[in-house]
């Protein structure tokens, strides 16, 4: 007979219907959005809002009267909220509450489908419904929530196609299209998808996936990305998804020590450097190319230092709570705690992050016999980590892989509960 605490926990988790968990997820997110109101909380919200306001008022994705090459979907989503309801940050926050709650529901369905366990699906839905950082970022006018909303179904449909060995091209095409949309939210999804397509070639060669399914996935993925790159070529003169990668690489290499203290400190140091001052006379795409080459040159000339930076960035990526020593500005544009103290943020993190990280890796190991069909999950995790170990890294950038860890942890926990009377 199970102990009383376990019986009560199982009654709460498995006795509560999916609809109730979905309503709880939505209620928590709406309540948090309302508590945030219309002010800025993360400094990056300023940039997203500026693009969205410009798009809503002029129809052009850009600022200062000129088009920019940047990921379009978050700005388009926020601009639609501004056009429909008014230029108040509360409205995109409320809209994202629905998106995030829907993603939690999708994650539950995905887990049940890929593991074959309805109990695992219910566990994943419950965890995603109350996971504090899904709730937190649903309230921020940033790209994270929309990125998850496309990455989760994209990975699900690719794994579903692998499960059926690519008999139908439709799930693969849907997965490719969803991952393209994810890349139009955060361009880091593009190189991660390339890793998935390379693995798809191996799966085809091994007879585990059909060439028809791989072709459909790559075609559905490449067409929208090519179209956006072509737009950027016509508008700003660069065939790329955005023009931000070079500056990011500089922050993670040449300016690593300053960036570890504060991004503003890193920018202040960069602005004093002669090559940066000289680059300001160039158009933005060429400017970013200068930064990219400078960052790559630093990596080539300082291999030992770069390896030490990578080790520190790997720790930053996997740390279970926000750094208490990192500077956070509190002003009209920055209020990242959203009313919670630094100690409170650490406490909330320590309640959930170690359990989900360790449980997620335990679950991924338990699912190792099914890696032939579930390998997109592991590759997405590795690709996300690799990008941020090379560029810039902090706990925030782990958010896109948390659905994978939740899925795996739920699968392992459900299997253990079924085996243990």
Image (tube, rainbow, N blue to C red):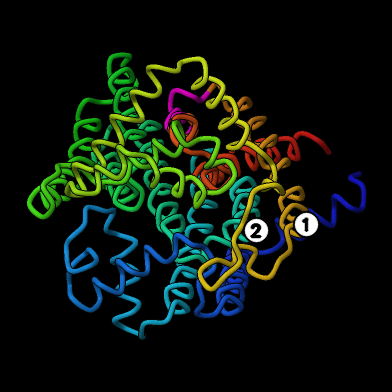
Q: Which residue is tagged 2?
A: 132
In the drawing, what numbered circle is on residue 225? none
| Vertical comparison of 414 with 214: above or below | below
Q: Quadrant of residue 196?
A: top left
| Vertical comparison of 341 with 227: above or below | below
Q: Is the C terminus in the top left, top right, bottom left or bottom right quadrant?
A: top right
Q: Nearer the viewer, residue 40 or 123?
A: 40
Please name the residue shown 57% across and 30% down the image. 314
Please name the residue shown 58% across and 27% down the image. 367
Q: Which residue is tagged 1?
A: 343
Residue 411, horizontal then vertical, whole percent: 63, 39
Q: Nearer the viewer, residue 326 or 275?
A: 275
Q: Quadrant of residue 125?
A: bottom right
Residue 66, horizontal then vertical, whole percent: 16, 63
Closer to the N terminus: mark 1 or mark 2?
2
What is the spatial separation of the Cα atoms under label 1 and label 2, in whole angstroms?
Answer: 15 Å
Q: Quadrant of residue 418?
A: top right
Q: Is residue 377 left or right of residue 286?
A: right
Q: State which region is magenta.
A: 370-379
The reply to whether the magenta stretch includes residue 374 is yes
| Vertical comparison of 77 with 248: above or below | below
Residue 5, horizontal then vertical, whole percent: 89, 53
Q: Secondary structure at mark 1?
A: helix
Please say whether residue 18 is visible from this viewpoint.
yes
Residue 20, horizontal then vertical, whole percent: 62, 69
Please name the residue shown 22% across and 67% down the image. 64
Task: Name the main secondary structure of what is drawn in magenta.
Answer: helix
Q: Is residue 167 left or right of residue 38?
A: left
């Amino acid at each position: 007979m199970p102990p009383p605490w376990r019986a009560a926990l199982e009654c709460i988790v498995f006795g509560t219907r999916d609809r109730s968990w979905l309503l709880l997820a939505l209620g928590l997110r709406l309540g948090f959005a309302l508590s945030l109101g219309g002010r800025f909380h993360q400094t990056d919200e300023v940039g997203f809002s500026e693009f969205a306001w410009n798009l809503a008022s002029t129809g052009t994705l850009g600022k200062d009267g000129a088009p920019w090459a940047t990921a379009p979907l978050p700005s388009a989503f926020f601009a639609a909220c501004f056009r429909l309801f008014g230029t108040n940050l509360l409205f995109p926050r409320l809209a994202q509450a629905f998106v995030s709650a829907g993603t939690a529901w999708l994650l539950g369905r995905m887990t049940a489908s890929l593991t074959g366990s309805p109990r695992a699906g219910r566990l994943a839905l419950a965890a995603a419904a109350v996971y504090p950082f899904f709730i937190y970022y649903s309230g921020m006018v940033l790209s994270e929530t929309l990125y998850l909303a496309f990455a989760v179904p994209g990975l699900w449909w690719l794994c579903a196609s692998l499960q059926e060995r690519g008999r139908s091209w439709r799930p693969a095409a849907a997965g490719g299209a969803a991952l393209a949309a994810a890349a139009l939210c955060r361009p880091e999804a593009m190189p991660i998808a390339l890793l998935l397509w390379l693995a798809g070639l191996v799966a085809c060669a091994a007879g585990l996936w059909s060439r028809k399914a791989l072709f459909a996935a790559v075609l559905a993925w490449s067409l929208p990305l090519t179209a956006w790159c072509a737009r950027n070529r016509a508008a700003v003169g660069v065939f790329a998804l955005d023009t931000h990668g070079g500056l990011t690489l500089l922050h993670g290499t040449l300016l690593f020590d300053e960036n570890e203290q504060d991004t503003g400190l890193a920018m202040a140091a960069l602005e004093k450097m002669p090559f940066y001052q000289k680059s300001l006379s160039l158009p933005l795409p060429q400017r970013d190319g200068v930064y990219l080459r400078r960052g790559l040159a630093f990596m080539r000339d300082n291999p030992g230092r770069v390896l030490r930076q990578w080790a520190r960035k790997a720790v930053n990526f996997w740390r279970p709570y926000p750094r208490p020593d990192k500077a956070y500005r509190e002003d009209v544009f920055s209020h990242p705690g959203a009313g919670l103290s630094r100690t409170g943020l650490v406490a909330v993190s320590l309640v959930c992050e170690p359990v989900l990280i360790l449980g997620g890796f335990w679950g991924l190991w338990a699912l190792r016999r099914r890696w032939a069909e579930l390998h997109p999950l592991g590759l997405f995790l590795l690709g996300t980590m690799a990008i941020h170990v090379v560029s810039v890294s902090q706990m925030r950038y782990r958010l896109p892989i948390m659905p994978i860890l939740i899925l795996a942890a739920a699968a392992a926990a459900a299997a253990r509960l079924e085996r243990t009377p």
